Image: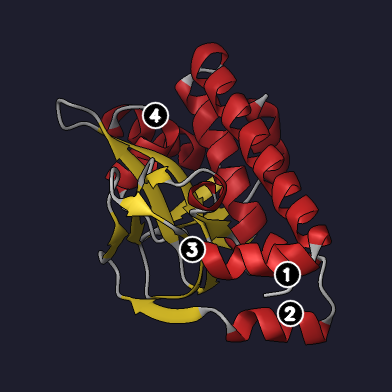
Amino acid sequence: MKKAPLFAALDDEAATALQQSMTSSRLERGDILFHEGDQGDRLYVIREGKIKLGRTSSDGRENLLAILGPGEMFGELSLFDPGPRTATATAVAETQLIGLGHDNLQAFLTDRPEVAATLLAALARRLRRTNETLADLVFTDVPGRVAKALLDLSSRFGRPAEEGILVAHDLTQEELAQLVGASRETVNKALADFATRGWIKLEARAVILIDVERLKRRAR
């Protein structure tokens, strides 16, 4: 939990005090925490598992904005700018969360301004990442975006394996395509090409990165 921006600026005593004011919840894969458009007044920190944030267009198409894992937070916009949720939050694995309401956080920030600075830094990183994603959609081809997505997932969910880096992303092929912003067929073609070249090995809702350097060059 100390990795979460909400706790990073706190000593152990303050972090424990804040955590005691938070509520716990548990989700199974496929459970929806909140829908796009719902009124929100609470942020969440992931203790275990993974959450996907997605949006749905008027014609029913879906796009994944992010896949988040342990230590990452979401829903913080509603604390600074109360209003409708901008995405739907769905568990893609068994997930444990802790949530903090607007009133509790405001009271805490009054005594701990360093936490506000840490949260603003986290928001700035989120905005920078969003800008990079928009640029990738314009300037990077689908295989490049797939390579970049695999590297990003490995940096957060990867662990050493005998053949390389095992990335248990828990995503279906359709969800991975939504994350990249392309059709499932095009993404599957890119993954198959990477596997044929020996850069990756595909597993069920996971992938093993074998040649990370090649993927980095393809992601540029």
- Badge 3: residue crowd in 10 Å (few <14, some 14–19, many ≥20): some
Is there a contact, CB below 8 Å, between mark 1 and mark 2?
yes
- Say which element carries label 2: helix
Instruction: Check disc 3 and give the amino acid type.
Output: Ala
Instruction: Check disc 4 and give the amino acid type.
Output: Gly
Q: Which mark is residue 15?
A: 2
Q: Which mark is residue 168?
A: 3
Label 1 to label 4: alpha-carbon separation: 32 Å
Q: Which mark is residue 7?
A: 1
Disc number lying in front (1 or 4): 1
Disc number lying in front (1 or 3): 1
Q: Who's the residue at 37% across and 79% down the image?
A: 26
Q: Who's the residue at 39% across and 54% down the image?
A: 40
Quarter of the picture containing the C terminus is top right
Among the two numbered marks 1 and 2 on one chain, the one whose residue lies closer to the N terminus? 1
Label 1 to label 3: alpha-carbon separation: 26 Å
Instruction: Check disc 2 and give the amino acid type.
Output: Ala
Return the residue at label 4. 181
Among the two numbered marks 4 and 3 on one chain, the one whose residue lies closer to the N terminus? 3
56 lies left or right of 176: left
Residue 123 quadrant = top right
Q: Position of residue 23 (x, y in %)?
A: 47, 80
Among the two numbered marks 1 and 4 on one chain, the one whose residue lies closer to the N terminus? 1
Residue 208 quadrant = bottom right
